[in-house]
Amino acid sequence: MKKAILYCLLLCFAIPASAQYYLRGDVKDEKNQPLQNVKIFLHSARSIYYSGSYGSFGFTVPNAYDSLSFSLDGYEVKSLRVKSDLWQSIVLKTSASHANNNKPKLISITKDLKQSSRLNLFVSNETYFQLVENEFVKAANFPNTGFSLNVNKASYSNVRRFINMKSPVPPDAVRVEEMLNYFNLHYREPDPGQVFRVESQMTSCPWNPGKQLLFLNVSAKKLNLEKIPPGNFVFLVDVSGSMDMPNRLPLLKAAFQLFVKNLRAIDTVSIVMYGGTVGIWLQPTSGAEKDKISKSIEELTAAGDTPGESAIRAAYKLAESTFIKGGNNRVILATDGDFNVGETSEKAMDELITKQRQTGVYLTCLGVGMGNFKDSKLQTLAKKGNGNYAYLDDIAEAEKVLVKELTQTFYAVADDVFMNVEFNPAMVKEYRLLGFDNKKEAIADAGSDLEGGEIGSGNSTLAVFEIVPTQQNQLTISTTVAEELAVVSLRYSLLNDTLNHRLNYNIKADYAQMDKIDPQLKFGAAVLMLGLKLKNSKFQGITDWDLIRSTAQSAADKNDFLQKEFLLLVDKAEKLYEPKKKKKAKPKDD
């Protein structure tokens, strides 16, 4: 009898201990519109989930009662205690000051570290964000550093435009991580079933003898071209008066004509144009009707002012009306960025796109032009639009971005990608992240946080650290035992997925001299040095034109047009920045 009572008691305790509850609900705004990608923090498990395309969410919890916090850019954080077996209808209020929308986001961050800033630079009527180079950081005091990954490549082609025009490059136009991205160096296919592959390489630092370079390479899986999802593309084309130049609207028209050739019958194309007024130039049209789409593109002409704000709203509205669930829904904005009607500031653009991204529509920005080019606006739009940004300086670049790198540019494999690196102070005395420089206003705002980026199919992203090694690190080089240098944590979310994914990677001190590493990484070192030289960086060490050239020449792939072009660009830059002095004429003998 006693055994039976004991058994019943144990059963009573066991049942609730193993119980699982499925917590479900949805999140909407005050206008009853669903909100997707709302971050949901489950306090008991310290886990993070996200709301889906229609604001809904659902996950298992172990407790009958639990606490949740809901947060989303532009809305007030809401925390509450809930009963797990009831449907949760959550309403988020718009933040009165839009503080989160307007808050500048950091590209890289080292916890508790303060940074300095410097003055802005304007070239003609072009605008660039004020950037602050990352400093050397003591690993013993600040072992953790994080940075956002993206596949933007605009900086390199923009730098090339200045050099080809024999004009000095604005230092803030030089973003070395984008210059590296441009070449898609050291791509390595991830293992089957994996989204990313992470590799590392330690080597010598050519511009700072005694220091080391740590290359971190993140390669994204390639999508099968025959199986990529249907595309819902809305071309948002600036046809304002400022676009009436050969390297603006005519270049964009030629670029889009190249893009159209690769469309499939399952793809849909629409065109919204803005110049004086905003209008739908081409209603949603199947990719099978290439002649109709091409004719519509060819008939675009430039005139009027630039109502960018209302055009963006119209393009997103059209993309939503033809939204393909599980497809690639994307607005492709093509402009010089010179908005002059409606909201025009970077702050206003930030706020507008942050709201529009909740639709699940991605944004790709294609920049063109010179003199009034607004790099800072296009950067803001691409970042906030869950998208990417490229600059087209000629038709060859248009073909590279829209044809050769079609899936890299327009088909994402992961969102909100950022990397955290925790250094081992026993091996690393100091470190400095090259590139991923922060905007001045983001550093000035103590409340700024880190925001990840979009990674497209088949992209290789390189991050490089300059390292001051410890004595133990130096001793490791001469032994066969590779000690742990750092631990990498790559965080990302998949498309149309509410879960947060994480990939961990241990970095071993696998040191090799520069001449012994993969030539593509060595070529990357030359690209870095050109960036440091053009920025006139205080960290450029002994970098000179001969060192850049010799490093690139010894590593460049002779069959790669872009790498051969880089060598010519170095020669042009040297002539521009250091023209040879005219020899003084010898005095004639009396």
Image (cartoon, rainbow, N blue to C red):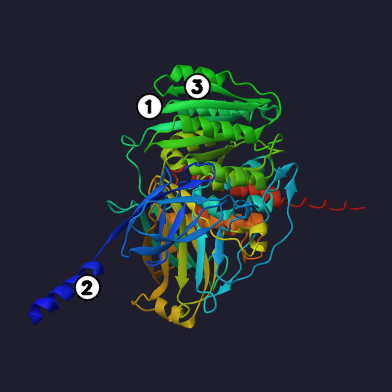
Identify the mark nearer the N-term, 3 or 2: 2
Q: Are marks 3 and 2 in contact (CB under 8 Å)?
A: no
Near-viewer residue (34 or 106): 34
Give the percent coordinates (x, y) of residue 375.
64, 44
Q: Which residue is mark 3?
A: 283
3D distance between C-alphas at marks 2 and 1: 60 Å
Q: Could you say whether the residue bearing mark 3 is in a helix, strand or loop?
A: strand
User: Quadrant of the image for the N terminus?
Assistant: bottom left
Near-viewer residue (460 or 446): 446
Which amino acid does the dot numbered 3 rest on? Answer: Gln
Q: Which residue is mark 1?
A: 264
Q: Could you say whether the residue bearing mark 1 is in a helix, strand or loop?
A: loop
Q: Which one is in front in this view, the residue at disc 3 or the one at disc 2?
A: 2
Where 547 falls versus 156 (above or below)?
below
Where 272 falls versus 101 (above or below)?
above
Q: Which one is in front in this view, the residue at disc 1 or the one at disc 3?
A: 3
Identify the mark nearer the N-term, 2 or 1: 2
Residue 4 appears left or right of 532: left
Where 473 falls versus 364 (above or below)?
below
3D distance between C-alphas at marks 1 and 3: 17 Å
3D distance between C-alphas at marks 3 and 2: 63 Å
Q: Could you say whether the residue bearing mark 2 is in a helix, strand or loop?
A: helix
> Label 1 neighbourhood size at 10 Å, few (<14), some (14-19), many (20+)?
some
Q: Which residue is mark 2?
A: 13
> Label 2 neighbourhood size at 10 Å, few (<14), some (14-19), many (20+)?
few
Near-viewer residue (356 or 166): 356
Which amino acid does the dot numbered 1 rest on? Answer: Arg
Q: Which one is in front in this view, the residue at disc 2 or the one at disc 1?
A: 2
Residue drawn at point x = 49 percent, y = 38 percent: 401
Visible residue check, residue 396: no
Which amino acid does the dot numbered 2 rest on? Answer: Phe
